[in-house]
Image (cartoon, helix red, strand yellow):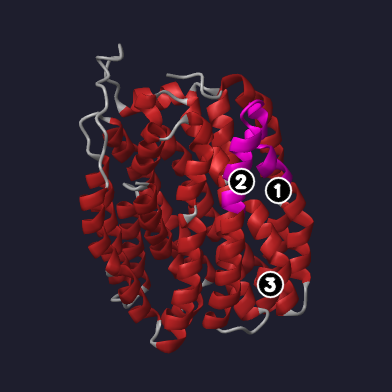
Amino acid sequence: MLWVLLVVYVFNFLDRQIVNILAEPIRKDLGLSDTQIGLMTGLAFALFYTFLGLPIARYADRPSTDRGRLIALALAVWSLMTALCGLTTNFVQLLLARIGVGVGEAGCTPAAHSLIADRVPAERRASAMAFYALGIPLGSLMGMVIGGYLADWIGWRTAFLLVGTPGVLLALVVLALVRDPPRPSMASQGHAPQGLWAAMKELAGSSTFMLVLAAGSACSFLSYGKTTWATIFFQRSHGLSPSEVGFWFGLWGGIAAMCGTFLGGWLADRFGKTDRRHVVTGPAIGMLVAVPIAFMAYQASDWRVAMALIMLPNALNALYYGPIFSSVQGLVAQRHRAVASAMLLFGQNLIGLGLGPLFFGMLSDWLKPEFGAESVRYVLYGAAFLGLVPAALFWILRPRLHAELDRQT
């Protein structure tokens, strides 16, 4: 189950993130502004992904729902919409296609998280969630490398078509292999059925859950914003082609993020067994240490030095995936697991994916009159120092997790 879900999540982020490496060719071809690039790569996708994710997650939490079938349907939808991106001829059409990708992807991760939480023991949950979350750097890596080479070789339109189509076939594999174990009804557990708003209100009443949500959203805001504009930064400020950025930044940055993701889950399970505060100690320290290194990377005048320096922040910033996803599942009852995951994704994607690229794009447009093509470099300076915010939130979260984690039934 974990291996199949990992492959699905790779396709999830491959289809989601390929637009980052294709953003500069798209901008030149369609004559877009940086603000429109930020809107197309972030907010258009995130709005529908996050708002539809909540009711779909509530549907996934119903004991009668087959979560494997739900994931397969979602995969087919977002893959088709990715392919349609390659057929667009103007900004509005591309925006609508990206919205369609968000609609499809809304049905994947909440259902997958609840499946994993039901099947994996609590003491191994952070590692299992980190394993699933390897799809983020793997998919992003593949999107960068494949998208970069396809953009230089056959153009951005064909790149979308070639990347989106295989997901439809993968959906058939998911239907055949992913089985949803039987779940007890809410009545048999002594709980009356709840609507979406009642479930959300119950979860929002936990200050610890809301702190996890804030920390995850802050990480996501920086991650999505920096990834989108770092790919553009290496093209504008260092003169690299999309394929060169895709290889060096996508491949090696993706490998670094994979190492950080796996390490974060292992550290959380290894040191969080006796003291639950240490579930998020790694992310707190990692975010702090990454700040000065990222600043030096963006300041470097040689792109090779910049690429080498940026690998460590990529790894350190990825330590939070397993700990935060497993913490959310450990703070709520089984009947709320998919909704809890959707609420975390709501914050991460609306604030992170929706506002991160858009905010940095607007800031780049604002700085252009003074700094010209170097405006993105100065935006990334600020993004590096903003890493102090999630570092502080994770440190504050530590004692709360020790008191509350895995107390729900």
Whether label 3 touches label 1, CB < 8 Å: no
Badge 3 is on which residue? 307
Q: Amino acid at mark 1?
A: Gly
Badge 1 is on which residue? 286
User: Relative to residue 169, is residue 120 depicted above or below?
Assistant: above
Dot 3: what SS? helix
Residue 301 location (% of width, % of height): 77, 78
3D distance between C-alphas at marks 2 and 3: 22 Å
Seen at 63% across and 23% down, the residue is 402
Badge 2 is on which residue? 264
Residue 93 location (% of width, % of height): 31, 69
The reply to whether the magenta stretch includes residue 278 is yes
Residue extent of the magenta highlight: 260-286
The mark nearer the N terminus, 2 or 3, is 2
Whether label 2 touches label 1, CB < 8 Å: yes
293 vs 12, left or right, is: right
Is residue 359 among the parts visible in the rendering?
no
The reply to whether the magenta stretch includes residue 359 is no
Residue 158 circle label: none
Mark 3 crowdedness (10 Å alpha carbons): few <14, some 14-19, many ≥20: some
Seen at 45% across and 31% down, the residue is 121
Seen at 66% across and 73% down, the residue is 368
Mark 2 crowdedness (10 Å alpha carbons): few <14, some 14-19, many ≥20: many
Dot 2: what SS? helix
User: Relative to residue 189, is residue 123 depicted above or below?
Assistant: below
